[in-house]
Each structure stands twice: as structure tokens, then as C-alpha cells.
Amino acid sequence: MRCRDAACFRECTCELDTLVGRYLADHPAARERPVAEWLVPLLEARYPCRPATPNKP
């Protein structure tokens, strides 16, 4: 998802806040670990990478 306007950006931010909040509520020990250990896998699971599409002229 690409956010292009302020309304979409707010929606994306709220979604991420909710995702992280729920994860930390379910995994309180994660607060003691470096963020990169749990945030990257969490985001990759929620937003899987897609192959880049070539630019069309």
C-alpha cells in the first residue's frame, strides 16, 4: 500500500499502531528485546514483499 494523501497516511499509521500494540500486549517480553528482533518479522508477516514491477515507458 502506498499512502499518497494525509487521510491515507493517518490510516496507515493507525493500522501500524494497532499492530504493534497488539503484538506487545500478547508478547510483553518483547519490550525487553531489541526492536529489530521482533518488529521486522512482524512487519514482513503483515506486509509481505512483492516483486517490483518494471516501470513502463
Image (cartoon, helix red, strand yellow):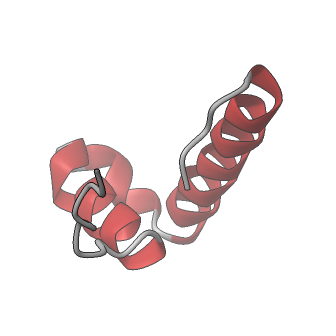
Q: Residue at x 32, y 55 (%)?
A: 39
Residue at the (36%, 47%) spot, across then down: 31
User: For the image shown, how many numbered marks are present on the structure?
Assistant: 0
Q: Is residue 31 left or right of residue 55?
A: right
Residue furthest to the front: 57
Q: Residue furthest right?
A: 7
Q: Quadrant of residue 10?
A: top right
Image location (x, y in percent) of residue 14: 73, 41
Q: Is residue 2 above or below residue 50?
A: above
Q: Picture coordinates of residue 50 (x, y %)?
A: 30, 75
Residue 35 position within the rendered picture, expressed as x and y whole percent measured from the top left: 25, 45
Left or right, 7 with reference to 40: right
Quadrant where the N terminus sits is: bottom right
| Residue at image coords 60%, 59% | 19
Determine whether 37 is above or below 8 in the image: below
Q: Nearer the viewer, residue 57 or 40?
A: 57
From the viewer's perspective, is 45 left or right of 37? right
Question: Which sits in the foreground, 50 or 36?
Answer: 50
Is 28 placed above or below 34 here?
Answer: below
What residue is rendered at 59% in x and 48% in y?
Answer: 16
In the rendering, at what x and y percent does residue 33 appear?
20, 50
